[in-house]
Image (cartoon, rainbow, N blue to C red):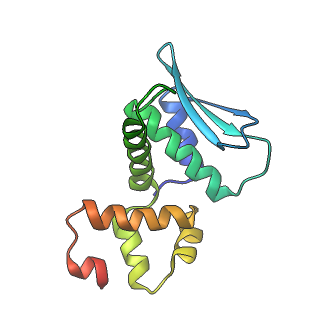
Amino acid sequence: MGTRADFYKVAAENHVEVLRYPMPIIGSMSTEVNGACYIGLDNSKPCTYAEEQARIGHELGHCLYGGFYSMATPFDIVERHEVRADHWYIRHAIPKQVLFDLLKQGRDADEIAELLDTTEEYVRRAYYYYKENEDLTEEELYG
C-alpha cells in the first residue's frame, strides 16, 4: 500500500521532480518538458497528509503512463487522462483486497481514508473502480 513517502520515492526513482509553487485553484499539476516530468504541488495553503498523498499519487499517474494534455486537447481526451491518473493512484494507494477487507469489517469511507492516509473521495472512487472494472465476486463486494 502506498504512503506519501513511497510516492516521493517512486518520483525520485523515476526522475520526476516535485516542485512547490502557489497553485491555490488547482492544488497540483504535472507536465513533461524536454523528456523530463515535473509535479507541481500547491504551497499557498496547508493540506493534510492524505490530500498531499492523493495529489502526488494522481500526478505520478500522469507522469508514469505519459498522460499529458494541453489547453487545445478535446475534453473527452482530457477526462480519459484524468481517469487513468486516478486509477493509477487507486491501484497503488488503495489495494482492492485491503479496501474490501475493511468494508467487510464494517468500516465507512471516513475510517478507511484515515487508515490508508488518503481522502474519502478516493476511497469512494476506488470502490466504484474495483466494482466496475475488476472481476469481483459477490462475496468480495458484499461480504
In percent of width and height, residue 133 lies at 26, 59
Q: Report which quarter residue 62 is drawn in.
A: top left
* Position above or below: 103 against 135: below
For the N terminus, the image quarter is: bottom left
Q: How many marks?
A: 0
Up the image or down, 62 lies above or below 15; here it is below
Q: Residue at x 40, y 29 (%)?
A: 66
Q: Which residue is drawn at the image coordinates 39% and 68% (left, top)?
A: 127
Q: Position of residue 79 (x, y in %)?
A: 41, 43
Q: Residue furthest top?
A: 34
Name the side, left or right, on which 49 lies relative to 126.
right
Judge left or right: residue 49 versus residue 110. Answer: right
The one of 141 and 2 positioned closer to us in this rendering? 141
- Tell me where residue 143 appears, x and y as whole percent: 30, 85
Q: Nearer the viewer, residue 99 or 32?
A: 32
Q: Quadrant of residue 98?
A: bottom left
Where is residue 89? Give x, y as percent. Answer: 45, 50
Q: Is residue 112 above or below residue 139?
A: above
Name the residue: 57% across, 63% down. Answer: 119
